[in-house]
Image: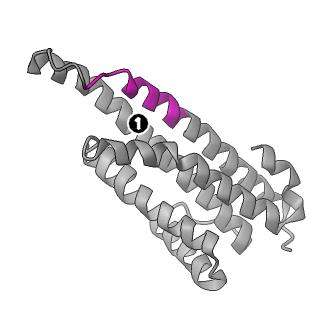
Amino acid sequence: MAIFNQEVQNFIKKKLTDAKILFERALCELDVENRISFAETNLRIKEIIEKIKPCEYNLRIAAESAWGATTSAIDALVSSELEDHPTIIERARTESLKQLVRDFDTSDLKEIWDKYNSRMVLLHGKCFYNGECYDPLDRIKERIESTDELLKLINNIINNNSSLYNGLSEI
Protein backbone atom coordinates (compact mmCIF):
# COMPACT_ATOMS: atom_id res chain seq x y z
CA MET A 1 0.00 0.00 0.00
CA ALA A 2 1.40 3.34 -1.00
CA ILE A 3 1.61 6.21 1.46
CA PHE A 4 1.12 9.59 -0.17
CA ASN A 5 2.05 13.03 1.03
CA GLN A 6 -0.75 15.52 1.67
CA GLU A 7 -0.16 17.39 -1.60
CA VAL A 8 -0.65 14.23 -3.69
CA GLN A 9 -3.71 13.24 -1.63
CA ASN A 10 -5.29 16.64 -2.25
CA PHE A 11 -4.47 16.45 -5.97
CA ILE A 12 -6.12 13.03 -6.31
CA LYS A 13 -9.24 14.15 -4.41
CA LYS A 14 -9.52 17.28 -6.56
CA LYS A 15 -9.14 15.33 -9.81
CA LEU A 16 -11.81 12.78 -8.81
CA THR A 17 -14.16 15.60 -7.80
CA ASP A 18 -13.46 17.40 -11.10
CA ALA A 19 -14.21 14.18 -12.99
CA LYS A 20 -17.59 13.83 -11.30
CA ILE A 21 -18.53 17.45 -11.97
CA LEU A 22 -17.49 17.24 -15.64
CA PHE A 23 -19.42 14.00 -16.11
CA GLU A 24 -22.55 15.59 -14.63
CA ARG A 25 -22.14 18.50 -17.05
CA ALA A 26 -21.79 16.04 -19.93
CA LEU A 27 -25.09 14.40 -18.99
CA CYS A 28 -26.76 17.80 -18.67
CA GLU A 29 -25.57 18.87 -22.12
CA LEU A 30 -26.54 15.51 -23.59
CA ASP A 31 -30.05 15.94 -22.24
CA VAL A 32 -30.35 19.20 -24.18
CA GLU A 33 -29.33 17.31 -27.33
CA ASN A 34 -31.94 14.63 -26.67
CA ARG A 35 -34.74 17.19 -26.95
CA ILE A 36 -34.47 17.14 -30.74
CA SER A 37 -36.59 14.51 -32.41
CA PHE A 38 -35.04 13.28 -35.62
CA ALA A 39 -38.37 11.62 -36.43
CA GLU A 40 -39.82 14.98 -37.42
CA THR A 41 -39.74 14.07 -41.09
CA ASN A 42 -42.55 16.45 -42.03
CA LEU A 43 -40.33 19.47 -41.31
CA ARG A 44 -38.58 21.16 -44.15
CA ILE A 45 -34.82 20.63 -44.42
CA LYS A 46 -34.11 24.23 -43.39
CA GLU A 47 -36.11 23.85 -40.17
CA ILE A 48 -34.32 20.60 -39.31
CA ILE A 49 -30.90 22.18 -39.85
CA GLU A 50 -31.85 25.15 -37.66
CA LYS A 51 -32.81 22.77 -34.85
CA ILE A 52 -29.74 20.54 -35.21
CA LYS A 53 -27.14 23.31 -35.10
CA PRO A 54 -27.74 24.41 -31.48
CA CYS A 55 -27.84 20.80 -30.36
CA GLU A 56 -24.64 19.95 -32.18
CA TYR A 57 -22.92 22.57 -30.08
CA ASN A 58 -24.34 21.07 -26.89
CA LEU A 59 -23.38 17.58 -27.98
CA ARG A 60 -19.86 18.87 -28.58
CA ILE A 61 -19.83 20.34 -25.06
CA ALA A 62 -21.14 17.03 -23.68
CA ALA A 63 -18.41 15.12 -25.53
CA GLU A 64 -15.66 17.44 -24.31
CA SER A 65 -17.03 17.40 -20.74
CA ALA A 66 -16.99 13.58 -20.75
CA TRP A 67 -13.43 13.72 -22.11
CA GLY A 68 -12.50 16.17 -19.34
CA ALA A 69 -14.00 13.83 -16.74
CA THR A 70 -11.95 11.00 -18.23
CA THR A 71 -8.68 12.93 -18.14
CA SER A 72 -9.26 14.16 -14.58
CA ALA A 73 -9.89 10.61 -13.39
CA ILE A 74 -6.83 9.34 -15.30
CA ASP A 75 -4.71 12.06 -13.65
CA ALA A 76 -5.93 10.88 -10.24
CA LEU A 77 -5.18 7.24 -11.11
CA VAL A 78 -1.70 8.03 -12.41
CA SER A 79 -0.96 10.13 -9.31
CA SER A 80 -2.17 7.39 -6.99
CA GLU A 81 0.00 4.75 -8.65
CA LEU A 82 3.10 6.77 -9.51
CA GLU A 83 2.93 8.87 -6.31
CA ASP A 84 3.56 12.03 -8.30
CA HIS A 85 1.65 14.75 -10.09
CA PRO A 86 1.27 13.89 -13.75
CA THR A 87 2.13 16.57 -16.24
CA ILE A 88 -1.09 17.89 -17.66
CA ILE A 89 0.24 17.57 -21.19
CA GLU A 90 -1.83 14.92 -22.94
CA ARG A 91 1.19 12.96 -24.18
CA ALA A 92 2.55 12.64 -20.63
CA ARG A 93 -0.86 11.44 -19.40
CA THR A 94 -1.11 8.88 -22.19
CA GLU A 95 2.45 7.65 -21.64
CA SER A 96 1.95 7.45 -17.87
CA LEU A 97 -1.23 5.40 -18.30
CA LYS A 98 0.47 3.16 -20.84
CA GLN A 99 3.30 2.59 -18.33
CA LEU A 100 0.80 1.58 -15.64
CA VAL A 101 -0.80 -0.94 -18.00
CA ARG A 102 2.63 -2.40 -18.82
CA ASP A 103 3.82 -2.48 -15.20
CA PHE A 104 0.72 -3.96 -13.60
CA ASP A 105 -0.89 -5.81 -16.54
CA THR A 106 -4.37 -6.15 -15.02
CA SER A 107 -7.64 -6.53 -16.90
CA ASP A 108 -9.01 -3.40 -15.18
CA LEU A 109 -6.10 -1.27 -16.37
CA LYS A 110 -6.39 -2.68 -19.88
CA GLU A 111 -10.11 -1.82 -19.85
CA ILE A 112 -9.28 1.71 -18.66
CA TRP A 113 -6.68 2.02 -21.43
CA ASP A 114 -9.21 0.99 -24.08
CA LYS A 115 -11.91 3.33 -22.76
CA TYR A 116 -9.44 6.21 -22.48
CA ASN A 117 -8.32 5.79 -26.09
CA SER A 118 -11.84 5.42 -27.47
CA ARG A 119 -12.89 8.64 -25.71
CA MET A 120 -9.78 10.48 -26.87
CA VAL A 121 -10.46 9.60 -30.51
CA LEU A 122 -14.26 9.69 -30.64
CA LEU A 123 -15.27 12.35 -28.10
CA HIS A 124 -12.27 14.66 -27.97
CA GLY A 125 -10.98 14.34 -31.51
CA LYS A 126 -13.84 13.43 -33.81
CA CYS A 127 -16.79 15.11 -32.08
CA PHE A 128 -15.31 18.10 -30.25
CA TYR A 129 -12.49 19.15 -32.56
CA ASN A 130 -13.82 17.96 -35.91
CA GLY A 131 -17.51 18.55 -35.19
CA GLU A 132 -18.44 15.07 -36.45
CA CYS A 133 -20.85 14.37 -33.61
CA TYR A 134 -23.63 12.72 -35.60
CA ASP A 135 -21.58 10.03 -37.28
CA PRO A 136 -22.37 7.73 -35.49
CA LEU A 137 -24.60 9.54 -32.99
CA ASP A 138 -25.49 6.44 -30.95
CA ARG A 139 -21.84 5.52 -30.40
CA ILE A 140 -20.95 9.04 -29.27
CA LYS A 141 -23.90 9.22 -26.87
CA GLU A 142 -23.01 5.77 -25.49
CA ARG A 143 -19.40 6.85 -24.80
CA ILE A 144 -20.60 9.98 -23.02
CA GLU A 145 -23.16 8.13 -20.90
CA SER A 146 -20.83 5.22 -20.05
CA THR A 147 -18.10 7.55 -18.78
CA ASP A 148 -19.65 7.03 -15.35
CA GLU A 149 -18.61 3.35 -15.48
CA LEU A 150 -15.03 4.38 -16.23
CA LEU A 151 -15.01 6.87 -13.34
CA LYS A 152 -16.33 4.22 -10.94
CA LEU A 153 -13.69 1.71 -12.10
CA ILE A 154 -10.89 4.23 -11.55
CA ASN A 155 -12.31 5.28 -8.20
CA ASN A 156 -12.47 1.62 -7.09
CA ILE A 157 -8.86 1.00 -8.07
CA ILE A 158 -7.71 4.06 -6.14
CA ASN A 159 -9.81 3.16 -3.09
CA ASN A 160 -8.65 -0.45 -3.08
CA ASN A 161 -4.97 0.43 -3.40
CA SER A 162 -4.65 2.78 -0.44
CA SER A 163 -6.23 3.00 2.99
CA LEU A 164 -5.77 6.78 2.82
CA TYR A 165 -8.64 7.10 0.36
CA ASN A 166 -11.51 5.56 2.28
CA GLY A 167 -13.51 8.78 1.99
CA LEU A 168 -13.15 8.98 -1.78
CA SER A 169 -15.72 6.30 -2.48
CA GLU A 170 -18.39 8.97 -2.04
CA ILE A 171 -16.84 11.16 -4.77
Residue 89 seen in the figure: no
x, y percent for residue 143? 45, 49
**Quadrant location of residue 83?**
bottom right
Residue at screen point 35% across, 54% down: 122
Is 36 inside the magenta-drawn segment? yes
Q: What is the chief secondary structure element of the magenta stretch?
A: helix
Q: Taking 53 as reference, is 44 left or right?
A: left
Q: Nearer the viewer, residue 22 or 155?
A: 155
Q: Nearer the viewer, residue 133 or 14?
A: 133
Q: Nearer the viewer, residue 143 or 97?
A: 143
Q: What residue did someone put label 1 on?
A: 61
Mark 1 residue element: helix
**Quadrant location of residue 117?**
bottom left
Give the residue type at disc 1.
Answer: Ile
x, y percent for residue 39? 24, 23
Residue at screen point 71% across, 72% down: 81
Residue at screen point 24% across, 46% down: 135
Residue 128's place in the image compared with 6, above or below, is: above
Residue 170's place in the image compared with 76, above or below, is: above
Q: Taking 79 as reference, is 57 left or right?
A: left
Residue at screen point 58% across, 84% down: 102
Q: Taking 153 as reference, is 165 left or right?
A: right
x, y percent for residue 19? 61, 46
Residue 64 seen in the figure: yes
Is 2 inside the magenta-drawn segment? no
Residue 58's place in the image compared with 84, above or below, is: above
Residue at the left extreme of this rendering: 45
Q: Which residues are magenta?
A: 25-38
